[in-house]
Image (cartoon, grey):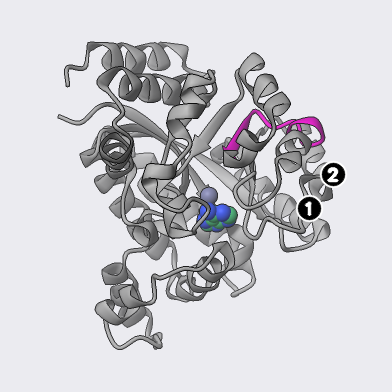
Amino acid sequence: MPLPKAELHLHIEGTLEPELAFALAARNGIGLPWADTDALREAYRFADLQSFLDLYYELMAVLRTEQDFADLADAYLARAAAQGVRHAEIFFDPQAHLARGVGMGTVVEGLWRALGASETRHGVTTRLIMCFLRDESAASALETLDAARPYLDRITGVGLDSAEVGHPPAKFREVYEAAAALGLRRVAHAGEEGPPAYIAEALDVLGVERIDHGLRCVEDPELVARLVRDRVPLTLCPLSNVRLRTVESLGDHPLPAMLDAGLLCTVNSDDPAYFGGYAGDNFDAVREALGLGDDRLRELARNSFHAAFLDDDEALRARYLAEVEAYTF
Ligand code: ADE
Ligand code: ZN
């Protein structure tokens, strides 16, 4: 039995496995520029975040109907459950779909078909977090929030993703203020490729409660001290960092030093279909490459539930935390 954990940094579009992509392409009569799944997998050699994003957005062309989004999410939840994920907070990128003529309702209702059945079908509780693409305009983010208004009962929070450098958090001050006024939780990618200053800005200007990635905080000791003091969760994605070359190899990942410093780190999969593994695979990989012991792994699992948006069900959080403490390796 795998260690129980919460997944807090997972882009649902990044769970699109080549086999499902080809199946959806066939179902929707869409041609793909790769001969087969092997040829597509060959393209998964990324130089940086942008080279990944180019392919990530291109392959989304196969997602057209509610059922496509339901199938995508259900496949993810089945895989996550098999790797010990008990709770998943799932990002989606509506602007990437709206731009292709796929409506907000198609995306949210489709995802909800799978998420609404997830606890019964897979034993995984879920939350949905709507991300704004930071390389699109602030006005576009505001329009996206507006388009989501009919679906806010299904959306727990907002996030910020896509190409980071040159798109600082402050660009999105207004939409984050509007999201807060609507009662939405706030997170943002920061310090993946962008500088540590973006992490501080996301906290100060956007009022985020968690930082997605946050890896580059290690370059700024004062920022680290702040993140430790304020118990700001960082949703790290070790296999993603290797594939996108933000760290040279898994053995060089600063996770052990970050835990030693007292940072509230969690381990997540980001875009598992592209980066070589789901949540449990990321746990296994850091255990092997970094020599993390059972206590450290339990700490990571415990952190994931502490950092989860389960404030509306503290009894559930307590139950998950008890599962972590009772786990025998
Ligand atoms: N969108 C999907 N994956 C992402 C990542 N790792 N960073 C920024 N935006 C993303
Ligand atoms: Zn991400």
> From what the image shows, is residue 159 above or below residue 147?
above
Q: CB of mark 2 within 8 Å of CB of mark 1?
A: yes
Residue 38 point in image, percent of width and height: 25, 78
Label 1 amino acid? Answer: Leu
Residue 228 point in image, percent of width and height: 61, 18
> From what the image shows, is residue 149 above or below residue 184?
below
Residue under the image location 65 percent in, 26 percent down: 224
CA gap, disc 2 to disc 1? 8 Å
Graded by Cα atoms within 10 Å as few (under 14), some (14 to 19) or many (20 or more), the crowding at tag 1 reads some
Q: Nearer the viewer, residue 44 or 87?
A: 44
The quadrant of the picture occupied by the C terminus is: top left
The answer to whether residue 285 is visible is yes
Residue under the image location 17 percent in, 17 percent down: 328
Q: Which mark is residue 273?
A: none
Residue under the image location 33 percent in, 59 percent down: 71
Residue under the image location 49 percent in, 59 percent down: 244
Magenta stretch bounds: 203-213
Label 2 amino acid? Answer: Glu
The answer to whether residue 213 is visible is no
For residue 216, side relative to residue 207 (left or right): left
Residue 165 drawn in magenta: no
Residue 207 drawn in magenta: yes
Residue 247 point in image, percent of width and height: 49, 50
The residue under label 2 is 174
Q: In terms of secondary structure, where does tag 1 sit?
A: helix
The residue under label 1 is 142
Graded by Cα atoms within 10 Å as few (under 14), some (14 to 19) or many (20 or more), the crowding at tag 2 reads some
Q: Upstream in the sequence, badge 2 or badge 1?
A: 1
Residue 29 point in image, percent of width and height: 37, 86
Viewer-nearest of labels 2 and 1?
2
Q: In terms of secondary structure, where does tag 2 sit?
A: helix
For residue 185, side relative to residue 57 (left or right): right
